[in-house]
Image (spheres, helix red, strand yellow):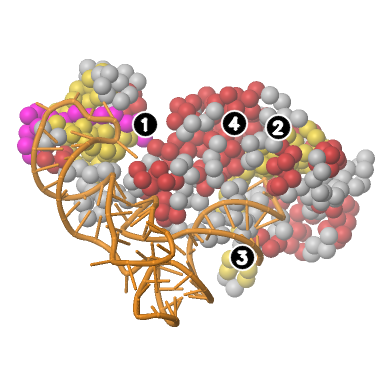
Amino acid sequence: MAKEFWIGDVQAGAHDGAEVELKGWVKRTRGSNKIRFVVLRDSTGTIQCVAKRETLGDEAFESLKGALIEASLILKGVVNADERAPGGHELIVSSAEVIGAVRAETPFPITESAMQAADGGETEFLLDNRHLYLRTGRMTNMLKIRSSVFGAIHSYFRDLDFTEYQAPNFVAGAVEGGSTLFEVPYFGRKAYLTQSWQLYAEAAMPALERLYTIAPSFRAEKSRTRRHLTEFWHAEMEVAWASNAEIMSHGEGLVRHIARTVLEEREEELNSIDRDLDLIARYADNPYPRIRYDEAIETLQGMNVEIEWGQDLDYSKEKILTQDYEVPHFLTHYPKIAKPFYHRVDPDDGNYVLCHDLLAPEGYGEIVGGGERTWSEEEILARIDEEGVPREPYQFYIDTRTYGGVPHGGFGLGVDRVCSWLSGADHIREVIPFPRDSRRVTP
RNA sequence: GCCGAUUUAGCUUAGCUGGUGGAGCGUGGGACUGUUAAUCCCAAGGUCGAGGGUUCGAACCCCUCAAUCGGCGCCA
């Protein structure tokens, strides 16, 4: 039953002249009443399979003729290296078996016209048929690139002796603003879906010192942009005894490692979605400059952008700021008033916090947010009270400081955003199998 | 929450100043022994998003609603 031969290997020339059994799905068929060309696909590629009536016999030939797009097949035959075949190889079919037929009354709905109309992006129709769209070349490429991104995150942290650690997804309190919480009924009480593992990571920081996770985070933002999902994958890290600058070095190291890994593992996929590999090499090979918030404001004001000191940088400002950047840039030292209580106030200037955002070029915007945490008990209590946040749901968090608090910090990276940026996607939805936004929870 | 737009066959679309809605793909039938999104012939498939209005007559004009898309704010 196990599959022995893969189309990708056949196209690579591994089985020239040999008899193989190919298992896969029909991508397209063409031909005459006496010869049929079946383009078969599996997870590794596509290959043209040539079936002749005189070889197969009438019965097998007729059943193959009835194999519609996305029917599953087992084809046996000899591999023939032939310039006429797309990819350079084809299978001369000696026997054919239809495993899962597709009925004529319900043909595979995703057609060339639907794909062409989407033009690399997505249409409502493709989103409604997401479960079937996953089988198409573009989506398969995206999923493979995504897999490499996830693998690169794990390898970056594990190579540095970080411990993978899991926080709960049901929580009682907010990390970000409370209005973006998903409320869920919880046995007569209210719970929320987590927006970040951060507070729970800080609780484990004294135990593990270097820890990371890749987990979903949930934010009930009604954002209708190409950068937002309500359920997104969040790679987060927390380190004890680390400064803002050191945490930034990890952020830079991680993102460059992801870019390098994707380049090494997914060149073929990136090429087939028309991504410029030189851009990704640039992101992998060059250091990421660090700019203070104040400098960014001055730059923007110099460009006659209307912005005042103390304002957070919204996307339109980010875009103006990053349009000339060739690599991601860090923005550091935001005003205290623009950030929540857990950001550590700069001991050198109480108006700022020790934080950073990493802004990706090409208009993709913020991909990392992080910094040092407020770590002394006295300071965390003062900042919680100052912002009018209730202490009670954060008692476990305060305890982290009460019992041997130490300087520490971390960051969160939007994995889907990184996938979207590195693959050059038009929309973040393109890089996640079943995207969730404010208007869609199906399929 | 705010702003803008779209909705015609399974999919993608054409449809001018209101006068019986066309096509390509897909599907079905037929032809063809090397096709490359094969080609050629034929066929089925539409209460034109829903409801109301104006009109002799509405896909087209007006109103209401719905769904969807794009952008902003917020963030990863």
Which of the chains bears the disc numbered 3? A
Asked whether the beta carbons under mark 4 and mark 3 sit within 8 Å of each other, the answer is no
Image depth: mark 3 or mark 2 in front: 2
Residue placed at 26% from the left, 50% from the top?
A107
> Which comes before the other along the chain, label 1 or label 4?
1
Q: Position of residue A208 (x, y in %)?
A: 69, 40
Quadrant in the rendering for residue B4: bottom right
Quadrant in the rendering for residue A59: top left
Q: Name the residue carrying label 2.
A: A325
Report crowding for label 4: few under 14, some 14 to 19, many 20 or more residues within 10 A (C-alpha).
Answer: many
> Which comes before the other along the chain, label 2 or label 4?
4
Q: Name the residue carrying label 4.
A: A258
Q: Position of residue A99 (x, y in %)?
A: 21, 43
Image depth: mark 2 or mark 4 in front: 2
**Is A93 or A104 nearer to us in this picture?**
A104
SS at badge 3: strand
- Please name the amino acid that badge 3 sits on: Glu
Q: How far apart are marks 1 and 4 (CA)?
A: 22 Å
- Please name the amino acid that badge 4 sits on: Ile
> Which comes before the other along the chain, label 3 or label 2?
3
